[in-house]
Image: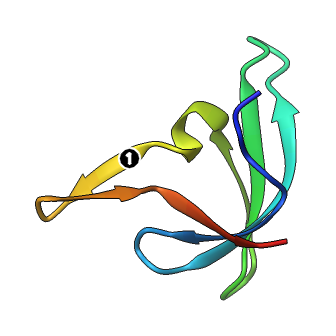
Amino acid sequence: MQDIKLGKYRHFKGNEYEVLHIAKNSENLEETVVYRALYGDKEVWVRPASMWNEIVERDGKAYKRFTYIEE
């Protein structure tokens, strides 16, 4: 399993999200992060766990896609 804790995270663009569960895709058993936006309509999203801790580049700078901020 990826090193992904349940709790609050900040996306590199600034919005905050809460990781609710780590689930498995029934088709390929890929680990998937189930998370909720902590703004607006508080929609629930999923993202492959392999993408969660990725480093992304924007405007020539590197950022962690999500940074853990609290439980």
Q: Is residue 61 left or right of residue 67?
A: left
Q: Nearer the viewer, residue 46 or 2?
A: 2
Residue under the point 75% across and 78% down = 42
Residue named by callout 1: 55
Q: x%, y% of residue 57?
A: 24, 53
Q: x%, y% of residue 7?
A: 81, 66
Q: x%, y% of residue 30?
A: 72, 20
The quarter holding residue 31 reads top right
Q: Is residue 26 left or right of residue 70?
A: right
Q: Work out which residue is located at the far left of the displayed protein and give it.
A: 60
Q: Which kind of residue does numbered mark 1 sit on?
A: Ile
Rendered image coloring scheme: rainbow
Q: Work out which residue is located at the far bottom of the displayed protein and give it.
A: 40
**Quarter of the figure with the C terminus:** bottom right
Q: x%, y% of residue 50?
A: 58, 31
Q: Is residue 12 positioned above or below 23 on the image?
A: below
Q: Nearer the viewer, residue 71 or 38?
A: 71
The quarter holding residue 37 reads bottom right
Residue under the point 53% across and 38% down = 51
